[in-house]
Amino acid sequence: MFHRAELIQAIYDGLNEKDQARIHTNKQLENIEETDDGVTVTCADGSTYQGSIVLGADGVHSQTRKLSKYHSSPWTDHRLSCFGMFQNARL
Ligand SMILES: Cc1cc2nc3c(=O)[nH]c(=O)nc-3n(C[C@H](O)[C@H](O)[C@H](O)COP(=O)(O)OP(=O)(O)OC[C@H]3O[C@@H](n4cnc5c(N)ncnc54)[C@H](O)[C@@H]3O)c2cc1C
């Protein structure tokens, strides 16, 4: 068993240097603009990025979802799951 942060680190470590350089942290999405040839996103620090599509993975209060013209509110489906972490030596 491992913590999700370790999984994210392992995925990042598996990328080559060129692709690692394409990962930008500490960015806050503020706006999405559809253009004739794709989409431009603007971050709170003023930086902009252009691409073909936007995939939002920014959680339950998703700004991506709020900015989408297909916006709908999240809902509760009443399913539950739990996890825990234990040191191997204590099992
Ligand atoms: C205390 C707690 C306990 C939990 N326990 C469990 C559990 O036992 N089992 C379980 O299955 N789930 C659990 N969950 C729920 C689980 O954490 C979420 O379901 C899961 O993290 C959702 O993943 P996600 O990738 O959609 O969003 P998140 O993990 O929330 O990731 C969203 C990311 O987007 C970033 N972000 C947000 N807004 C912006 C923006 N405007 N621009 C750029 N980035 C942005 C955030 O900084 C974050 O890094 C728990 C949650 C909490 C709070």
Image: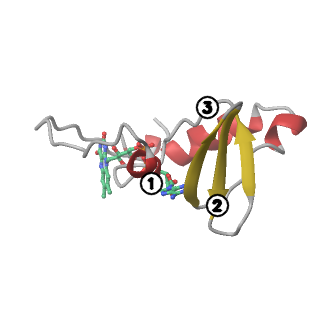
In the picture of the structure, the residue carrying the numbered disc 2 is: 43
**46 left or right of 21 in image:** left
Element type at mark 3: loop
Task: Estimate the x, y position of residue 12 in percent, counting from the top left.
Answer: 71, 39
Seen at 36% across and 37% down, the residue is 70
Seen at 73% across and 42% down, the residue is 50
Q: Earlier in the sequence, mark 3 or mark 1?
A: 3
Query: On residue 53, which mark appears?
Result: 3
Task: Estimate the x, y position of residue 15 in percent, counting from the top left.
Answer: 78, 32
Element type at mark 2: strand
Q: Earlier in the sequence, mark 3 or mark 2?
A: 2
Question: From mark 2 to mark 1, how far is it between C-alphas?
Answer: 11 Å
Element type at mark 1: helix
Q: Nearer the viewer, residue 15 or 50?
A: 50
Q: Is mark 1 within 8 Å of ligand 1?
A: yes
Seen at 79% across and 43% down, the residue is 22
**47 left or right of 66 in image:** right
What's the amino acid at mark 3? Answer: Ile
Seen at 22% across and 37% down, the residue is 81
Q: Is mark 2 within 8 Å of ligand 1?
A: yes
What's the amino acid at mark 1? Answer: Gln
Question: From mark 3 to mark 2, how far is it between C-alphas?
Answer: 16 Å
Q: Residue furthest bottom?
A: 45
Q: Earlier in the sequence, mark 2 or mark 1?
A: 2
Query: On residue 63, which mark appears?
Result: 1
What's the amino acid at mark 2? Answer: Cys
